[in-house]
Each structure stands twice: as C-alpha cells, then as structure tokens.
Image (cartoon, coloured by chain):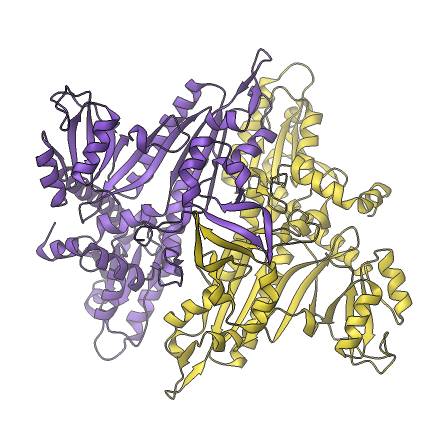
Chain colours: A yellow, B purple
Amino acid sequence: MPTTKREQITKHFGTWYRKVLIDAGVADYRYPIKGCGVWMPYGFAIRKHGLQILRDLHDATGHQEAQFPLLVPETSLEKEAAHVKSFEEECFWITHGGLKPLDVKLALRPTSETVITPMLKLWIRSHKDLPLKLYQIVNVFRYETKTTRPLIRVREISTFKEAHTSHATFEDSEVQIKEATGIYKAFFDALDVPYVISRRPEWDKFAGALYSDGFDTVLPDGRTLQIGTVHNLGQNFAKAFDVTYEAEGGKREHIWQTCYGISERWLAAVLGVHGDDNGAILPPNIAPIQAIIIPIFHKEKNETITEACAKLAEKLEKEAHMRVKADLRDELTPGSKFFDWELKGVPIRIEIGPRDMEQNAVMVVRRDNFEKASVKQEALADYLHEVMKKMSKDMREKASKWLREHVHSAKTLDEVKTLLKKRAGIVEVPWCGETDCGLKMEQEINGKMLGVPMDMKEEVSGTCIVCGKEAKDIVRVAVAY
Amino acid sequence: MPTTKREQITKHFGTWYRKVLIDAGVADYRYPIKGCGVWMPYGFAIRKHGLQILRDLHDATGHQEAQFPLLVPETSLEKEAAHVKSFEEECFWITHGGLKPLDVKLALRPTSETVITPMLKLWIRSHKDLPLKLYQIVNVFRYETKTTRPLIRVREISTFKEAHTSHATFEDSEVQIKEATGIYKAFFDALDVPYVISRRPEWDKFAGALYSDGFDTVLPDGRTLQIGTVHNLGQNFAKAFDVTYEAEGGKREHIWQTCYGISERWLAAVLGVHGDDNGAILPPNIAPIQAIIIPIFHKEKNETITEACAKLAEKLEKEAHMRVKADLRDELTPGSKFFDWELKGVPIRIEIGPRDMEQNAVMVVRRDNFEKASVKQEALADYLHEVMKKMSKDMREKASKWLREHVHSAKTLDEVKTLLKKRAGIVEVPWCGETDCGLKMEQEINGKMLGVPMDMKEEVSGTCIVCGKEAKDIVRVAVAY
C-alpha cells in the first residue's frame, strides 16, 4: 500500500467513499434533507456490532446506560455562558407545537450537558451517590453550513455515544479522564484503527470544559478525522445548574464532571482506513458476516456442494460461534458473488468446489490480502479463528504503519505549508504557546492545530514557526475534516 | 386480587404509577419539558431486554433493522393528504437552523411513512426486491395538548418500534398483517400481558391506512391502553410518493405497504397489569436481575455467608445462565434490601442465613405471591428455571383472568354508561355500523369505540344501542388512555 490504483482512490476518496456506502448497503444519504441519512440493514448490523464493543467497555468500567430527552429548552441551554455561545448558532430550533408558537423555544440537543445536568440535581444528594457514570447512545444535531459528508459531517449525528460522569473531587475527575482515554484506546484498537491523541488548544476546546483531548486518525486523502473527544468539565456546568452533594463533613460542594463522546465517525474511519479498490474491508470483530461460504460450480448446479455449503454455515455458527452465511443464490455466478461480498468487506470467503469436496477440504480466502489456503474441514474452526486474529493484527499494523508514515515534523511555516498542500497528513511543529501565534498559524497553513501530543513525550526544542520565539510546545497541525 | 389495598391503588393508580417509576429507578419525567422523560439505568435495562424479544421476533421473520432520519420536510409530510391533515397539528416544527429561518419547515417525525417511502423509491426496482420488511426502534414526537403521563401519553415517544413492509400484491400485504399480528401476540405473551384485538372504526384508523387493528389491555384503573397497532396502508403512500416495481410481465405497479408499531407503552402495561402494593413485578423474561441474593444475619457481619452469596451469584450466572446479583451492601438491613428489590420487581429473592448454610440450602421467595421454599443448593439451578416458568405462567393467567372479568356486554346505552362510569373495563355492545351512530355513541358514553373484535367470532344479534336498528357488528367500547 499504496498501490497505483490506491493512489487514484486517495485522490478521489470522496467518490469512492460515497459509492461504497451505498453499494455495500451501509448508509444512504440521498434523503431530501442535507446531512441526514439512512442506516441501511447491512450498515445497521455493522453499527450494532461496533456499538456492542463500546457498550461492553463502558459497562465493564461501571458506566450505566440511560436515555435522556432530545429536546432542550432555550432556558437550559443558556445557563452555561460559553456553552450557549458556542452552540446557539449551530442548533436546530423548534418554535412551533402544531400550529401554535411555543412560549420557550426548544433546541434539538447538540450534545447533552444541559439535558443531563438538571436531572443530576434531582438524583445526587451525598458523596455516597458519587461517582455516577452514565452514558447514552442517541442522535444529536448540528445545523452544519459547511459541505456535509456521510457519517463524517452531518446534520443528524445519528449515533452519538456520550458518557457523562460526576465526581466528588477534581482528582477523581482526572482519574476518570484516564479511564475514558483507556476505553477509547481499547475501542479503536478493537476496530484496528490507529490514532493520535492531542490536547486541543484553548480556542478549540469543548465549550464549557477545562480542557479537551481529541483522538484523530488520518484518512486516505491525507486529512485528519477527529474520532473521539474526552473533556474535563470541571465545575462549570455544576455551578451553572447548581448541582451539589453533601461531602463527608456535611458541607455542600459542587460536583466535578467529565464527558466524552464518539460518533458514527468510527465507521467512517474503519471504511476509510482499511478499504481498498474492491470496497470495504471489515475488521472481523464488527463484521456482521465473518465468513461467507460460496459453492463453486460451472453451469450445472451441484446439489451435493450446495448442501455442503449450507451445512458448513450451520456448523460454524453453532460450533465455532462465528457469524457465517452461505450464499446459495441460484441466479448469480461465483464471480459476481465474490464481487458482492468483497464490496461489503466480509473478512473471509470460503469456497467449496468439486475438488474440495473430494478432499474433504475448503478454500479459505482472506479479504485483506487475498491469501488463499486449502484447509481440511476438521481443522477449519480453529483455522478460521486464527486467521481472524491474524487478519485483525495485520490490518492494525498496516494501518498503523501508514499513519506513522503520515506524521511529519517541520521547523518552518513553509515546510508545513508544502506538506499540508500535498495532504501529507499530520505535521508536528514547535510553537511558543501564545493564542495569537496559534490562530495565525492556522490561518497561514490553512489547517487546524490538533494540539499537544498526549500519547508521547516529545522533547521541546527549536523556535515557534510563527513568531520565532523559543518554543514551549510541540504541536500537531493538519488539514482536518 | 384485588385486595383492599389494591383497590385503593386502583383508585390512585396514577400516583402509584409515577411513584414506582421514579422510586424503582425506571423513568423520571421531572424534566423541564412536559411529556419528555429520562430512562434511568434500571429502566433502560428492562427496556433493553424487552426490545431484545421484539427484535428477535422481527429478525426471525425476515425483518431487517435499519434507522431512518428524524426530520421530515413539510413537503414530504404533505404528500399523503389524509396523513398530513391528521398530523400537522400534532407535530413539533423546526423553523430555524441556527439564527436563520429555514426555507422549508421540518417536522420531528410523528411516525415514519413519509420518511421511509421516498427511500423505497430509490431501492425498489423489481418484484425480486419484494417483499422488503424493515423496522427501526427510534423516538417519535407528538405535540400533546392533553394531560401527559409517563410512558403512556408523552411528547417524546422515546421508544417506538415501527415496522414498514412493501409487497407486490394486496394478498401479500394481507398475509403480512397476519404475521405482524402473530409477532405482537408473541411479544405480549412473553410479557405476560393480556390483550384484546379490535379493528378500529373508520374515524379512528391510522391516517392513510385502509384499516387499522389495535391491541388493547386494561389498566388497574379500568381504562384501556392501546399497546400496539397494525395497519394495512394499501397503495396510498406508494401512489403519493410514486413507488413502483417492475412486475413479472415487465409492467410497473405500485407497491402495497403495511406498517405496525409498538411504543414504550408495553412497559406501562407490564407495570400496571402486574404491579402490587410493594411496587413493580417484572416477568422473568425481561427482568434485568432475575434473582437477587441477600445474606441474612443480625448485627454482626458473617463473612462466610457473604462469600457464599457472592459465589452463588457467580455460579448461577455462569452455569444457569441467569441474570443474578448478590446485594452485599453493608449499611443496609436485610429488611430494607427486601423493600428495595420488591419495589424494583425482581422476580426471585434468594436468602442465605446461618441455618441455610448448615443445610447447604437457600430460601427462595417468589415476588408475585411471596411463596417461600427451602431448596438444596445442588438442585437450585433447575428449581429456579422451573419457578421462573411457573411464575410467568401464573402472572399471565392471573392477568388474563382479571382482563376477562373486565370485559362486559351491554344492550343499552344506560348500561354502558353505568359500567364505564365505574371504570368497569371494556364493554361489548351491538352497533348498526353507521359512522353517525358510532360518533354519537362515543359522545354519549364519554368513551371510545375500540372496534370490532378480531380475536374472536361473536354472534351478532340485538339492536344498535344508539339508533335501535338491527345490529351489524358487536363492538368494544371503553374509557381509553
């Protein structure tokens, strides 16, 4: 990677991406409202398996799933000053119920701090109620005026996992930030999607937070995609909504909050990072069909082979606990079946032809590298589990290598400009730490500051690429989605 | 049933219901917008198990889960004339994106026919694409002006399972109606909730449908609750959105559609139908905790017992595949733990005290009738599965008996009025079949016509209770939520 063909795709990533989404039956954004799309059945199934991993990670760490209302009264949204300032121009506003104007305008939640915090006020009484770690998976809305892109920049973010936690002390909230970061790492590792973690600059942090950390990956077109964010909210919302608890001595204190979110962009990353000329390549963890079984015969249908395929599918489902399907459609050739399932990114193809039948074997083909192996039926279940593990590891390594190759460092503005112009990925540069310089940098490079690396310690040396003063930080910059 | 206490509850069902919802941690509607509520973690878990049954029933019959957008352009909603007329005064309307007015107003979906049908137009080409059976579980919205009630009459219907199917012929759609009815029967049977099925009168059918069948149950206060509806849409939406398919001869035909929906009212029914003075009683099928294990000791903590409880919970989870929890909280007495878990409706309580330990036994207590039994540990797993089955059966029978006792018949308007005034449940009466008479009947009895029984054949005899003409149908009437 990249092949020549791949390079063409990189150039035309947007076209490839939209085509794969619809043709593979993942998502269809040809809805009459811009930035609103449909999860088609196959896409919905991928989504389900991905969300199950996310749910398991949250449940295993004491998070409880809940569900809060969609609508936010303007009077609630207004309570945290920085928050409303950031969001009011991005909200969809309901002004009418039926034919009558409403007394108080209602926003569609752009995120749920102002929805959840008033309820915490009812629920939290004493330190015994803390920590309280809640999450929900819901739709949230932003009135995007920029160009929208399926699953990436949308008006209905149809799949937002947002966690909201409450703590007794700042220290506890800091521990929570570490846990949240760990959960997100584990999630993207399970998807074989590599990432960098950076602390966002002041001007780009979540409105109402003390600080925000972002997970970013690089898509084939060299632009970064923010795929997860973790925020320490301090006591800002707690004070705005006056949420207090009785501390051990009996004194009332405001709670400390964190929140962290992941949207359906995780799937955009999976498709973008792993896909190839033939379509999607799904990590076995989230593939709705992990192995597709295809009978091979020419012209005349072979009932014995067909039956063997159906039986094998059943056997693997039951005994190997895999998600398996036999494609027994009469009207299609093996070739067009291959095409279909490659497009959909099914990790493993199993072919059974007359010779395989004779040898009591099957042909196993990996979707990621098309490696073939003839495997005896009795050894198949173990072999498939091994192959899935291996495939996931190889996909992760390949993608990580690609990401590493797309992280550069530069010492001057011109170098950065040249790199970003050719969409080379992420560039690490020295910065003096001043907001003025940072904003000027973003303007000059026509890109975004992702922030200070949180996933590695970098020696700070050199001078700010904008003002030439001594550097205080190394920061990542990129052309971001 | 009903006990004297129960009768008081019946009178004050609303108070009991709201209190149980919050105190058991199911749902909290003290949100700053009327008719919008929160699924609390325990309630969310019940919801999850209930929805899993519903999903399994749909998946097993070839339905595919998908997810469609929330927002509907006014221009789409307007396309089916009867539909828009029914819904425009019930919609929440978005008029602004950020600070700017929108060109086309957007409704929050009140239901999704006008959302889904335009996509079908893109996806359905030929008879080979049919039948197409889709469903989604989403939130829908109605601007209720009447008094709202948690999970029953709300503005954000937070959990709407709506299925939408497309067929080549009217006959196929009729077969689908039967399948849908079967799915809903199986679902309510799994919840031990009894129901009657009635074909809604013309003036109460779903806007845009050929006909609508409703599932109703009776709550403890004697009012009926519609808990599911099944509609044959004919070709009304297909024609409005011009959705056609190529029939076998090559001719283009409009598709035939059905739709059917169940909201979170299923849980309102479960709580109302089964609950008692001590709180909720959950059918084992959907209980997030099927058995709660409580150590019994006075004053001094007994480590051996505590450990035995923890071990047993683990063992039952692993070996009996049950959802089990040990309540090892130090600060609470056994009595207050009983109170907590009874309120939450946990089907089975397992007590382990010093004497039980000696005998290698545990005490098993059923939530529905408080029957106790001492059971040897080695026989426990089998016993618990038996008890859960028995309990479910008993709950279903008790509730069915109660429902049957609350279905009456009457021959005169006065009889009906008397029965409904004392909230006696459902009354079956002869009706001439004329709309004028039907509407007049509803006005006179201050109730609703549920419609003609679809779950039994009734001999039609007698004369219409309004006009005195020969009866054409027996119809059910009631005071409905």
Give percent across and percent down for residue B138. Answer: 46, 46
Total of numbered circles in the picture? 0
**Front-most of residues A142 and B313:** A142
**Front-most of residues A467 and B415:** B415
Give percent across and percent down for residue B422. Answer: 11, 46
**Front-most of residues B319 and B109:** B109
Which image quadrant is residue A83 in? Answer: bottom right
For the C terminus of chain B, give its image quadrant.
top left
Q: Is residue B300 visible?
A: yes
Relative vertical location of residue A121 with respect to residue A355 in this rendering, above or below: below
Q: Is residue A208 visible?
A: no
Relative vertical location of residue A25 with respect to residue A395 in this rendering, above or below: above
Relative vertical location of residue B243 with respect to residue A70 in this rendering, above or below: above
Left or right of A350, for residue B375: left
Give percent across and percent down for residue A133. Answer: 47, 67
Which image quadrant is residue B456 in? Answer: top left
Give percent across and percent down for residue A366. Answer: 70, 40
Relative vertical location of residue A1 with respect to residue A258 in this rendering, above or below: above
Left or right of A36, for residue B153: left
Which image quadrant is residue A465 in? Answer: bottom right
Query: In the orientation shown, which residue stands out farthest toward the bottom?
Result: A249
**Front-most of residues B389 and B239:** B239
Query: In the orientation shown, which residue stands out farthest toward the top?
Result: B249
User: Residue at the location (90% across, 61% down)?
Assistant: A418
Left or right of B419, for residue A369: right
